[in-house]
Image (cartoon, rainbow, N blue to C red):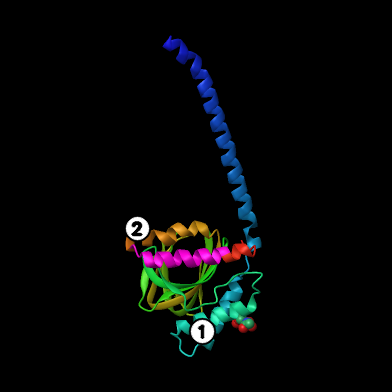
């Protein structure tokens, strides 16, 4: 009795299982094609230009009363951007005193989030005492405009040290990674364009699995979430 039962059940069960996997495969293919398509059109949502941000970074350095005054430069940049871009086009954080600790890739510093949306982010990041770590392997292009001090970097098989002084840009293309060092004091205006939410695991791994600094974690989540939400509300992806 039992054997005949299982015999009649097996082809039915494997048939529905096959169907289930067929639909899963279709869903995966649709998701893949959608992601590929979104990737080809993501530039439509970009508001900032790497070159104009570089000009702005250089203007902030030139206007600063002291070459180490990162506080002045962050204020200068925030003021310029809030005057340049209409609030209907892009939401910016106008409060340059909103700094939080950031630990990522083994490096530690503080950041002021100027802008965060799905396809772009702009922050001032740095430390007056120096730090060193892994850049992370990202789905976004990264432009590191040095404001104060110097950043060093290296990526094998090129065993020479790359050197980025104040006023220069260190461009890390998407999909590439380096070891970097903010030698002694260094601050930078960091602009990333690409798929920003996919960078979050790298940005949060150190705080979740190493420092357990829940105060900075809470502030980072609160500020980044708030800025992304403000941008979604005005249709800035
Ligand atoms: C912002 O900075 C850029 C680059 O220095 C400059 O060309 C522009 O005039 C500035 N805009 C404002 C509103 O200050």
Residue under the image location 44 percent in, 74 percent down: 99
SS of the residue under disc 2: helix
Image location (x, y in percent) of residue 180: 40, 68
Residue 149 found in image quarter: bottom left
Q: Which residues are magenta?
A: 212-229
Left or right: residue 115 versus residue 205 is right
Q: Who is closer to the viewer here, 70 or 67?
A: 70
- Give the vertical position of 31 relative to 69 (above or below): above
Give yes or no for residue 217 being in the magenta stretch: yes
Residue drawn at x 62%, y 63% is 233
Q: Residue furthest bottom?
A: 65
**Residue 3 vertical placement versus 54 (above, below):** above
Report the residue at 64% width, 78% height from top: 84
Task: Please say whether residue 175 is visible from this viewpoint.
Answer: no
On-image quarter of the N terminus: top left
Q: Is residue 61 above or below residue 205?
A: below
Which is nearer the eye, 162 or 229?
Answer: 229
Q: Which residue is mark 2?
A: 209
- Determine which residue is flagged by label 1: 61
């Amino acid at each position: 009795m039992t054997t005949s039962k299982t015999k009649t059940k097996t082809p039915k069960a494997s048939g529905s299982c096959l169907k289930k996997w067929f639909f899963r495969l279709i869903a995966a293919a649709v998701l893949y094609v959608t992601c590929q398509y979104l990737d080809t059109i993501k530039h439509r949502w970009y508001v900032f230009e790497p070159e104009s941000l570089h000009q702005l970074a250089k203007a902030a350095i030139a206007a600063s009363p002291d070459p180490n005054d990162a506080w002045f430069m962050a204020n200068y940049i925030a003021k310029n951007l809030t005057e340049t871009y209409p609030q209907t086009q892009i939401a910016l954080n106008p409060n340059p005193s909103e700094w939080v600790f950031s630990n990522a890739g083994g490096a530690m510093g503080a950041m002021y989030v100027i802008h965060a949306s799905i396809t772009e982010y702009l922050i001032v990041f740095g430390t007056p005492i120096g730090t060193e770590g892994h850049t992370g392997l990202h789905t976004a292009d990264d432009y590191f405009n040095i404001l104060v001090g110097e950043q060093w970097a290296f990526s094998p098989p090129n065993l020479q040290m790359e050197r980025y002084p104040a006023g220069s840009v260190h461009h890390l293309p998407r999909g590439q990674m380096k070891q970097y060092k903010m030698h002694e004091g260094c601050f930078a205006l960091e602009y990333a364009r690409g798929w920003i939410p996919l960078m979050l695991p790298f940005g949060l791994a150190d705080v979740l699995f190493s420092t357990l600094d829940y105060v900075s974690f809470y502030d980072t989540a609160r500020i980044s979430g708030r800025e992304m939400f403000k941008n979604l509300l005005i249709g800035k992806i």
